[in-house]
Image: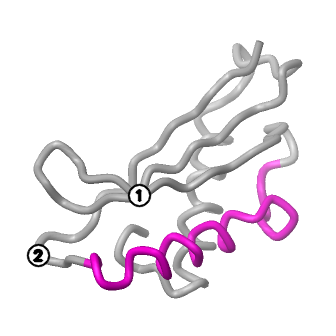
Amino acid sequence: MHYLLLYHYVANVLDRRAPYREAHLALAREALDLEKLSLPASLPVVRIEAEDYVDSTGDPSLRVLVVLEEAADVEKVSGKEVIQLKSAIRESLRNHGIALFA
């Protein structure tokens, strides 16, 4: 069994990136490279994926999928660790020039 943390980073109002969609997605995937991210050691992340989609209001969004290893004790995952994970993802997206979602 795997556990899944799913976060949605919603785009700023009126910003549309359709002409840059593939380039942004490639940058997002690069930004979320597990070997380069500074993630909390207590969260055994085995995979991170980025997916382009349109949210319920019609705004372009970035869906980030985080998969923890099967042996992870999710009962012991603290809010602080989740905040650190989200911050690491957001910071990496910004460092790769993806400020729209971060």
Mark 2 falls on what kind of element?
Answer: loop
Question: Where does the C terminus fall, quadrant-wise?
Answer: bottom left
Residue 13 % position (x, y) = 13, 70
Instruction: Mark 1 or mark 2: name the one nearer the start of the chain.
Output: 2
Quick one: SS at disc 1? strand
- Under mark 2, the amino acid is Leu
Q: Amino acid at mark 1?
A: Asp
Residue assigned mark 1: 52
Q: Nearer the viewer, mark 1 or mark 2?
A: 1
Highlighted magenta segment, given as a residue range: 17-40
> Measuring 80% from the left and 17% from the top, which residue is drawn there?
73
Check disc 1: other Cα within 10 Å, few if <14, some if 14-19, many if 20+: some
Query: Which of the 4 quarters of the picture holds residue 89?
Result: bottom right
In the depicted view, which residue is nearer to us: 34 or 53?
53
Percent of width and height locating residue 63:
44, 50
Percent position of residue 61, x then y = 32, 58
Q: Is residue 15 above or below residue 25?
A: below
Residue 77 falls inside the magenta stretch: no
Name the one closer to the observer, 84 or 71: 71
Label 1 to label 2, Cα distance in Å? 17 Å
User: Residue drawn at (38%, 68%), measured in percent from left and top?
Assistant: 101
Q: Residue at x 34, y 53 (%)?
A: 53
- As displayed, is residue 100 above or below residue 78? below
- Colour mapping: one colour
Asked if the residue at tag 2 contacts the one at tag 1, i.e. Cβ–Cβ closer than 8 Å, the answer is no
Residue carrying label 2: 14
Q: Residues within 10 Å of mark 2 (few under 14, many from 20)?
A: few
Q: Position of residue 75 (x, y in %)?
A: 70, 14
Residue appearing at x 77%, y 12% in the figure: 1
